[in-house]
Amino acid sequence: DIQMTQSPSSLSASVGDRVTITCRASQGITNYLAWYQQKPGTVPKLLISAASTLQSGVPSRFSGSGSGTDFTLTITGLQPEDVATYYCQKYNTAPLAFGPGTKVDI
Amino acid sequence: QVQLVQSGAEVKKPGSSVKVSCKASGGTFSNDAISWVRQAPGQGLEWMGGIIPMFGTANYAEKFYDRVRITADESTSTGFMELSSLRSEDTAVYYCARGGTTITVIRGVTRYYYSFMDVWGKGTTVTVSS
């Protein structure tokens, strides 16, 4: 089965900073990669699908890139409301799998 | 707009089983994929398994393969996740989530693929305690 890893596991940044989170798959997954945001005490929210497609209503400061095994989520201009844990997930072929998450603080 | 309504919180004894339901409305239930994701306290998201109701066959994560059973009732647009041989480590919030599907037929062989999860239920808290 394909395993997903993320780095860093946590980070602290300032408002307005550019934040980059890395996700790696143990095997190539083309672009079948999604990013989710989970704020404390809430349900996960889909941010990005197909590695780089921003979901409707998601602020444009979020962007995704990558293909194959290496992917990144970038927040350009961190805002206080972006405090959350971010998970990558590979989909398409079962079993699906999430990365361990990256906690973002300000 | 698809909505997923999950059953209420459960408290179970170790060794017992729990069955959580997830009723969908507003979408094409049979063609969608319903996944089950759990989150233990302070931990990350774990995909347990999923099902595409029109095919009826579930897929499972290896970790849960021998203890979980995922089913779907197309007549009521409801998905179910049953976890057996419960232990304290199974204390978690269990989410159902809806995703799209891709179906291919090549040389008579049908294969189906899970898409990303765009709609989530609110979660069901399962507490395992003696």
Image (tube, coloured by chain):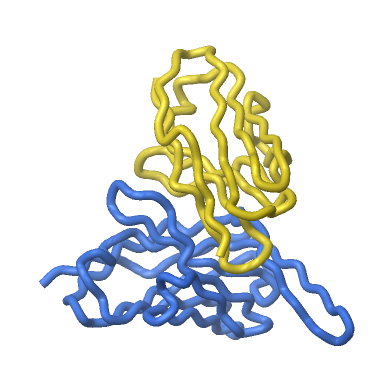
Chain colours: A yellow, B blue
Q: Is residue B1 visible?
A: no
Residue B18, position in %: x, y?
31, 78
Residue at 55% from the left image edge and 71% from the top image edge: B50
Q: Please identify the quarter of the rendering in which residue B85 is found.
A: bottom left
Residue at 53% from the left image edge and 19% from the top image edge: A78
Q: Please identify the quarter of the rendering in which residue A63 is found.
A: top right
Residue B66, position in %: x, y?
40, 82
Work out whether residue A42 or residue B89 is closer to the camera in this orientation and state it.
Answer: B89
Name the side, left or right, on which B90 lies relative to B97. left
Residue at 57% from the left image edge and 67% from the top image edge: A95
Q: Is residue B79 visible?
A: yes
Direction left: furthest residue: B130
Work out whether B129 lies above or below B118.
below
* Quarter of the image that includes the N terminus of chain B: bottom right
Residue at 34% from the left image edge and 49% from the top image edge: B43
Work out whether residue B121 or residue B44 is closer to the camera in this orientation and state it.
Answer: B44
Work out whether B20 lies above or below B97.
below
Work out whether residue B3 or residue B35 is closer to the camera in this orientation and state it.
Answer: B35
Name the side, left or right, on which A99 lies relative to B7. right
Work out whether residue B18 or residue A11 is closer to the camera in this orientation and state it.
Answer: A11
Residue A64, position in %: x, y?
67, 35
Work out whether A89 lies above or below A16.
below
* Quarter of the image that includes the C terminus of chain B: bottom left
Direction right: furthest residue: B107
Work out whether A77 lies above or below B87.
above
Q: Please identify the quarter of the rendering in which residue A103 is found.
A: top left
Residue A39, position in %: x, y?
42, 38
Report how many numbered discs are placed on residues in the image: 0
